Image (cartoon, helix red, strand yellow):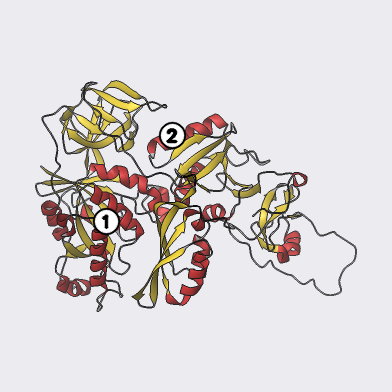
Amino acid sequence: MELRNICIIAHVDHGKTTLVDHLLKQSDTFGSHVTLDDRVMDSMDLERERGITIQAKNAAIKKGEYKINIVDTPGHADFGGEVERILGMVDGAVLLVDGAEGPLPQTRFVLQKALEKGHNIILVINKVDRPECRGTDRVQQVIDQTFNLFIDLGATDEQADFPILYACARYGWCTENYDDVEDLIEGRKKGTLDPLFERVKTRIKGPSVEKEKPFQMLISNIGWNDFVGRLAIGRITAGEIKTNDRVCRKGVNSKGEPLNETFKAVKIFTYMGLKQVDCEVMSAGDIAAVAGSDAFEIGDTVTLNEGTDALPRIHVSQPTLAMVFSVNTSPFSGRDGEAVQSRKLRERLIREVRHNVAIRFSETEVPDQFRILGRGELQFAVLIEQMRREGVEFMVGKPIVLTEVSADGQKMEPLERLTLDLPETYGSDVTRMFQERKGMLMTYDNVGHGRIRLEFDIPTRGLLGMRSKYLTATRGEGIMSSNPIGMVEWKGDMLHRINGALIADRTGVVTEYALMGLEDRGAMFVKPGVDVYEGMIIGENSKDNDMNVNACREKKLTNVRASGAEILVGLKGIREMSLEKCLEWIDEDEWIEVTPKEIRLRKKVLAQNQRSIIRKG
């Protein structure tokens, strides 16, 4: 069969996974009796809960005499490492752009990587049934913006001459003729994704490979099979491999020195639909999964023998943030889950690094604390949530921005391009908010329908803790996304959090009576009946200093009774602190204690007589 290897590029929530659903349903891959779930490629629980793609995954479909390998890539910049390693497996891309929102930063980030690889692009304008697109010239504006983006990113003449399709992925149709869109929306015409299938066949080139050379495959992903264990997934760039062949894994050891391991390819799998299917022989150009070694790592090359050269290892952009993971040392350690020792925590973090090339691991001066380097708060939040669901207890510190020193001795920090899409009413408040965080307003566009788009160049430090504040300022109507663009000189000190913390001064159970007496002091994070310990943070102070308070005080019983019925007074409300909110809120002298059942905030020094209530900075 003719081969085509493609990936789908899109910003978060532009309809990428939904489009893949309908491509699978309208192909010749499944029988008429097979029913596919919605968002079938988002197989992780976290992906379904958050509505985003986190891990890149493979599928393959048949359409006529063609086999099309599809890789569903994440749309969020925090998972850019997934994108960078996957683009080497494909020969072209479908760029999916929301017809109302247009190309956004994550679109730019992934598209730039695809153009650098020399891939041809098919542009699909999705969600053309949105009210903002109908009866307006918004779709044409989005096409112009996308073309300008291609030129800005240095696309070749062939790449910039991209075909355009108009689609509604939710209902599974597309067309190359914009005049048909209204009839398709109203149901006067029936549409399918056949125009997209045809464009994939004609626009995307078949794999450029060397079938006569010895076997070579770069490992771009790692999988698991219950019967044969670890799987090396990648595109075969040369030669062919057969079941039970003796092959060689060319990798590196912990010191970065070359390492060769010979093993037998006990099983070879190809993709058909969403399943891995046994295969006796696989040839150059196809995407295969090979079993036979438990030491596979992303970036290794599987070759026919030790004499065959290894392919260049996968390189991804440098991390911008660091976070310390620690063994749980709180008084409640071991109550809800497994209080792991430092050895187990270290092994779990190293295992994550092997699967995800976008994060790095390093030791710290403290034996039971380890530093993980990554791209963004969301990437850390996903890792923490995965470990939490495994029943592990641990603590994490505040995300710290990674700095460098330039050749002339200047301190440098990462800079990001921040794009905000929001109602025009909140424009001035939002502009002031980000300018206070050292952001520089670069562009101000009125996109119509009462909405504006702002672009800031802002240090990564300035974005920490800003997502929830931005959503509050825009009443939940704002869209926020950012993309790393390089390093700049240190922009000076920046206050992370104005307010101090309310800290429990003893171990006990929180009472409603005590919280009612503390309400005027600030916002509460805990409810009555919750167990607390000395040094645990129970709320945010209304002033800028920390305050030790008694949250366990009970009402004393007396023999005095009021003549009338007692007046019942309820608490004003408790601020629910999710994991993301905790990551945004904490300061450098605080930990987040993560257990399978609870997320608690605490001071690093628990005893109140050993720490100051005056906050620095």
Disc 1 versus disc 2: distance between alpha carbons?
Answer: 35 Å
Mark whose residue sits in front, 1 or 2: 1
Q: Residue at x 52, y 67 (%)?
A: 433
Mark 2 belongs to which amino acid?
A: Arg
Q: Residue at x 21, y 75 (%)?
A: 186
- Front residue of 500/378: it is 500
Q: Give above or below for 108 relative to 333.
A: below
Q: Quadrant of residue 312?
A: top left
| Quadrant (top left, top right, bottom left, bottom right) of the N terminus | top left
- The picture places residue 317, in percent across and down from the top left corner, at 37, 45
- The reply to whether residue 475 is in sight is no
Q: Residues within 10 Å of mark 1 (few under 14, many from 20)?
A: some
Residue indicated by mark 1: 153
Mark 1 belongs to which amino acid?
A: Leu
- The picture places residue 453, in percent across and down from the top left corner, at 38, 69
- Front residue of 42/212: it is 212
- The picture places residue 456, in percent across and down from the top left corner, at 42, 63
Q: Quadrant of residue 144?
A: bottom left
* Label number found at residue 351: 2
Q: Residues within 10 Å of mark 2 (few under 14, many from 20)?
A: few
**Mark earlier in primary sequence (1, 2):** 1
